[in-house]
Image (spheres, grey):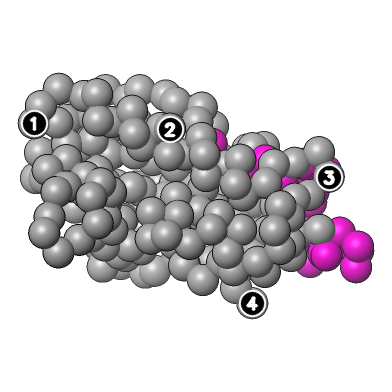
Amino acid sequence: MLQVYLVRHGETVWNAERRIQGQSDSPLTEKGEQQAHQVGERVKRLGITHVIASDLGRTRRTAEIIADACGCTVTLDPRLRELNMGVLEKRPLDGLTEEEERWRSTLVDGTVDGRIPQGESMAEMAARMHDALNACLSLPAGSRPLLVSHGMALGGLISTILGLPAHAERRLRLRNCSISRVDHQHSAWLAEGWVVETAGDVSHLDAPALDELQR
């Protein structure tokens, strides 16, 4: 059985400012750095063999801190990037027009093929996230990889593993530096392939992070 750990990046300046990030970037806050160190302390005894991260700065920095704790190097994979949020990237969440908020809402309210202009659909994002996850099946036997990605991206991945459509209403909260785990296994009682073991665990954090969409 292959176990894959999934970690969302630490809190960023734009998370704290409630600003839309997408594939644009902002640095980790001091709290975000602390969260990444707490993940490292949690997972360093789990036998992590590979740390693979989105190539965006916030995930790369989070991965570097975790990899240092685990004695690993970091491999970058652009398929693990956050959803491309098009023309709304860098915009304050509280400053959107009514039309812009309707565009954003299509990503979370179950709209089929919803997308922000010049952005990406949830289905497109989920497809590349599954490609990145399935690439772990080619790692050497006995590997235990940890992937560092983003809130929308990991939420879409876990939801589709559970059999929900990529565009399903977003109901899975994955806070900054939460840890999830998915296993690829063969069982008489579960579906073949990927199954969800845990999702959104923040028990290692001394103060759970705020979700950037929560008021």
Tell me how far mark 1 sits from mark 3, CA to CA.
43 Å
| Inter-mark Cα distance, 3 to 4 | 25 Å
Secondary structure under badge 4?
loop
Q: Which mark is residue 142?
A: 1
User: Mark 2: few, some, or many residues within 10 Å (few <14, many ≥20)?
Assistant: few
* Residue located at (45% from left, 55% from top): 160
Mark 2 or mark 1, earlier in chain = 2
Query: In the rendered structure, which amino acid carries the disc numbered 2?
Result: Asp
Classed neighbour count for the residue bearing mark 4: other residues with Cα under 10 Å, few (<14), some (14–19), many (≥20)? few
Q: Residues within 10 Å of mark 3 (few under 14, many from 20)?
A: some
The type of residue carrying mark 1 is Gly
Q: Amino acid at mark 3?
A: Pro
Q: Which residue is mark 2?
A: 131
Report the magenta residues as a range: 81-102
Q: Is residue 110 left or right of residue 66?
A: right
- Residue labelled with disc 4: 215
Of the numbered discs 4 and 1, the one sitting upstream in the chain is: 1
Which of the two marks, 2 or 1, is nearer to us in this view? 2
CA–CA distance between discs 2 and 1?
20 Å
Residue 193 in the image, given as x and y percentages of width and height: 25, 46
Q: Position of residue 116 (x, y in %)?
A: 78, 49
